[in-house]
Every structure is written in structure tokens, then in C-alpha cells.
Image (spheres, rainbow, N blue to C red):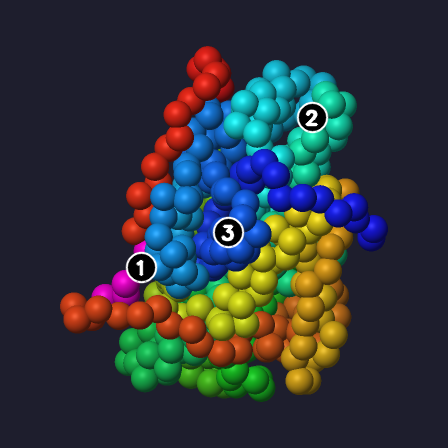
Amino acid sequence: MKSSPRSPTGRLLYAQSGGVTSVINASAAGVIETARAHGVKVFAAHNGILGALREELIDTSKESKASITALRHTPGGAFGSCRYKLKSLETHRAEYERLIDVLRAHDIRWFLYNGGNDSADTALKISQLGKAMGYDIRCIGVPKTVDNDLAVTDCCPGFGSVAKYTAVSTLEASLDVASMADTSTKVFILEVMGRHAGWIAAAAGLAGEGADAPPHVILFPENVFDETAFLAKVKATVERVGWCTVVASEGIRNAAGQFLAEAGTRDAFGHAQLGGVAPVLASLVKEKLGYKYHWALPDYLQRSARHLASKTDAEQAYAVGKAAVEYALAGQNAVMPVIVRTSDAPYRWKIEPAPLSKVANHEKKMPKGFITRDGFGITAAARRYLSPLIQGEMPPPYGKDGLPRYATLRNQLIEKKLPAFAI
């Protein structure tokens, strides 16, 4: 993709969107450190796109070099995130025009949006509107999602660390269950994130290999949940092994297309709020098989566990942030830095730009070839894909109190220039 040279004049706006990860701040560090090296001032929107609409912009130049470096090992979203989806340009043009007004008021010439599918769509629309309104703005998407469901990119920053946490948790909990199975728990159920794509659930399969190794049952949203087959698999496993570990994606559905765990409410993006599939499955196990069970819902723990982050993931998160700035300053627009795998063994990767139009509103699900024929496990192909993504450790520094030393930012807002905007 050709790009025109551009002198580093103007300012850069960075924003975090959607559910945060244990390494999204590594992308922020990549953005800020690279921009500083080019002499470009970076503002960060407070609480994602809402901060841009409200003209709540953080001056990152007030942060020390050490604080920005510490973002590389700090979980959460350092500048605040939000679940707020901009509607179409046709029905909500005023919001997009407000964004352009804010960008213009502060001489922001580059906008980097760190998020998933919806964020890629927002960045694409802002780039289109900027062109239509005659405002020179370069918009770059920065990939992030624990769900690993972004199109084009080989994997998504944030996923490798969740995958590592899930595989380790599955292994450790299974050792616990195996110890107690003779007189206590026979079935352990771990529920993981993944509304439509089963990548995180699949990662649990790295915990063991072979028919008797945990997890014995993985439930993917790509497959229709078959109660009879599920119960038969659990029963056969308990009778053969003495216990059974189940890992279930939150998004599994029945034959009617209904989420097993749907709570009947929706989030800000219009997605169904899921109320917990693990207790539903546990009730089935108890009622139909009579086994004693335990279930766990790691929820935020799985995406915030920076102490167990994958080094590969953390390095990729930083790399896409760095590349996003380089693309922006080189004059590229409406692109996203994506990860391209060049080799499985040894694992090698590189960063390349991809058009936002090929990422926005597309969803990458588990390939059929990654799921075993019985629907309850992962194949050798899936292991080849997943294993490199959890390699290496990059633990945070610890203090004398035994706790991690995470970054604490000032997050000083700049002075507003525009009237308030009702959202």
C-alpha cells in the first residue's frame, strides 16, 4: 500500500475502546513512546470515544517516561474505556461532526482507535467523514480483543494472555479435582468468555493432550449444544477417568439458536447479556447424572491477569501500537496494523497494514478443522496455531509488599475550547 510522506505537524489522539485486556496498555505505550520519538504530542481520550465527544482529552506529555514505560506491564485501560457504539453516519451525523469539531479545535491530525470490530468501523467512518468535510485526519485502527475474532490479523493482541491464563487455570483446577474425585467433586466446569467465537475455550485444550487429559469436554459456540451428547461424554469420562473437566464458552446455544445463559438484557453495543452458562450446565450434570460438581466463572480475572501474561502477546501488543503511529505519520489512512504469521515452528511473525474496510464488521470464528469430529476437543492444527501465542512470560515488577507495581498516571485533562455536547 503506497503512502505519502508527511511531516509530523499537529497532534495525535489515542483512545481505548470496549473490554480492556491485560496488554492493551502495552499498545498505548507503543503509541506514546513512538510518537514522542517523532516529536508528536499525544492526547488520550478519557473513557474512549466518549472522551472525544465530551472534549475530555488527557495530555500524555504530563506523564513521565517511567510511567509510560510502566504501561507495558499494567493491565486495564490506563485512560479509561467505554462500551459506546456510534450509530450510522446517516442517522447520527451530529456525533461524527462533533468529533471532527473536537479534532479541528485541537489541531489533531491523527486518530488512533484501540479496539475491536466496532472500533475499526468507527475509525473507518471518521476517516470518511473527515474527507467529506475537508478536514485532513488520518485514522488508524489498533487491534485489541480477547475474543480473537478480528478478521485479517493472524491473532489479536489480548488473546494470547487470556489463552495462557485459561490453559493454566484449566490445568491447575484439574489437578485439584483429580485429587478430590474419589470422595468429592466429580465434575468441574470452567466458563470462559466468547460470545460467538470459541477461541478462548479452545485455548483450554492446551492444558493436556489425549483422551484422559483435561479438559475432557470443550463446548464451542460454533457448535449447537447437544444436551444428550454432552451428558453422555461427561458420564463416560467420569466412569473411565474418575472425574471430568468441562470448559464452556459463554456463547453456546441450543438447537433453537438461544443462548443457554441469556439473561434477557443487552449491553451498549446491542449484544445479549449472558448470565452464566456454567451453573446451567452444572444443574444438568446434577439433575441427570447425580454427580457432585463445582463451577467457576473467571469473568474479569481472565482478561486482567497481567501477572500471567504471554510474552508473545505483550510484545505483539506493543508492536501494533508502534506500527500504528508509523503508518499514521507516513500518511496512511483507514488501515490497521495486523499480525502476519510467517512460521509455526519456530514461531515468527511480522506487522503489516490492512484496510479497515476488511476488518470492520467482520468476525473470525474457529475453523472447522480446529475442532475434533466429536465436537468436544481441539485438533493438532489448532494446537499448532494456539501454542505459540502463549509462549514466554513477562511478569510485572513486584514491591516489598509482594504486590505488582503498576503504573499510576496523572491523566491531566487539557482545557476545553468547545461548548458541551449532549450524548
- Give the labeled residue for mark 2: 135
Cα–Cα gap, marks 1 and 3: 22 Å
Asked if 195 appears above or below 93 in the picture, the reply is: below
User: Which region of the structure is painted magenta?
Assistant: 403-407
Horizontal side of 397 relative to 207 (left or right) equals left
- Give the labeled residue for mark 1: 406
Q: Amino acid at mark 1?
A: Tyr
Cα–Cα gap, marks 2 and 1: 38 Å
Asked if 334 appears above or below 253 in the picture, the reply is: above
Q: Is residue 316 magenta?
A: no
Cα–Cα gap, marks 3 and 2: 24 Å
Q: Amino acid at mark 2?
A: Tyr
Tell me which numbered mark, 1 or 3, is placed earlier along the sequence.
3
Who is closer to the viewer here, 385 or 313?
Answer: 313
Give me the residue at 44% from left, 33% from top: 57
Q: Disc number at residue 36?
A: 3
Asked if 297 appears above or below 119 in the picture, the reply is: below
Residue 339 visible in rendering: yes
Give me the residue at 37% from left, 33% from top: 413
Q: Position of residue 177 (x, y in %)?
A: 35, 78
